[in-house]
Amino acid sequence: MKIKHRYLYLLAAGVVVLITVRLVSAQNQNTLQGSEMKEISGIAASRINKNIFYVHNDSGDTSRFFAISPNGQLIETFYFKGDAIDCEDIAVGPGPEKGKSYVYLADIGDNHHQRRTIEIYRFREPVVSNKTTENLKCNTNYFKYPDGQHDAETLMIDPVDRLFYIVTKREDSVGVYTAPLNASFTDTISLKLLGKLHFKGFPLLKWITAGDISADGKQILLKSYQKVYYWKRKPGKSVWKVMQTKPAELPYTAEKQGEAIGFTADGKGYYTTSEGKHAPIYYYQTPK
């Protein structure tokens, strides 16, 4: 795409988003309450800490993520040793030790399609306390695409088939890639392309910016800048097979730059939030 055309797309998309934000009534007046949380790009519910969610900034931040309450209050900041480039999503799920929960931070952003590898950092899920900050140990998985570089902002953990799911962002039909949760930490793993998903809409506004799979593996969410897509998973079906069926479209208050969505721990609802200082955080119920 020529630069001039790209700017026209961005301008038009910005106008549409602003109009949408004004027309849709807010469902929740809570906001992210820490000045550090200025470019939030992912949200995921804790499995071991009641009413705690993990969020993180994207490119330009240091190697850290945050624990917050449902109303956006900053509870604790977690730092780790790593060379984070552009973290774009976060997920919680199983890992190597049976019965234990892990946090996965996806360093998968690649706006200019220049990265040879992308990384996913894995942490044993911490017990959130009254500490202001804490340092965590992490393991790093290195991945590469089988078909060249892609920009992506969506990481999902399938707890049933024990797979990473990465969905690309910008293509007209986005790619869906997987790798096993027990992938090697010493080798660069080639992701497996399962196929493409096509969503209707204006090119920029339909870009896929976030996703999540519920803790029991029975529900799936993907979101664009304008819509939230939802699937229910039947026993014996893979996430990929389910996502090839027509999704339901769920309520969504369009945000300035909404790039985060995550189920509650019990799967009865989901939260969204956006980039920007003191961004709103919205709650919605999932279909019964």
Image (spheres, rainbow, N blue to C red):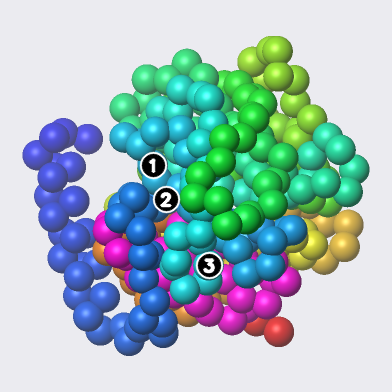
Decide which of tag 1 and tag 2 comes sooner along the chain. 2
Q: SS class of the residue under badge 3?
A: loop
Q: Residue at x 19, y 75 (%)?
A: 19
Residue closer to the observer: 236 or 135: 135
Q: Is residue 172 visible?
A: no
Q: CA distance from mark 3 to mark 2?
A: 16 Å
Residue 105 in picture, x, y percent from top left: 56, 40
Q: Which mark is residue 58?
A: 1
Crowdedness near tag 1: few (<14), some (14–19) or many (≥20) residues, C-alpha within 10 Å: many
Residue 138 in picture, x, y percent from top left: 64, 29
Decide which of tag 1 and tag 3 comes sooner along the chain. 1
Q: Residue at x 18, y 51 (%)?
A: 10
| Extreme residue toward the top, this view | 187
Decide which of tag 3 and tag 2 comes sooner along the chain. 2
Using residue 147 as the reference point, say whether residue 209 is left or right of it: left
Instruction: Between label 1 and label 3, give the one nearer the viewer.
Output: 3
Crowdedness near tag 2: few (<14), some (14–19) or many (≥20) residues, C-alpha within 10 Å: many
Q: Is residue 32 visible?
A: yes
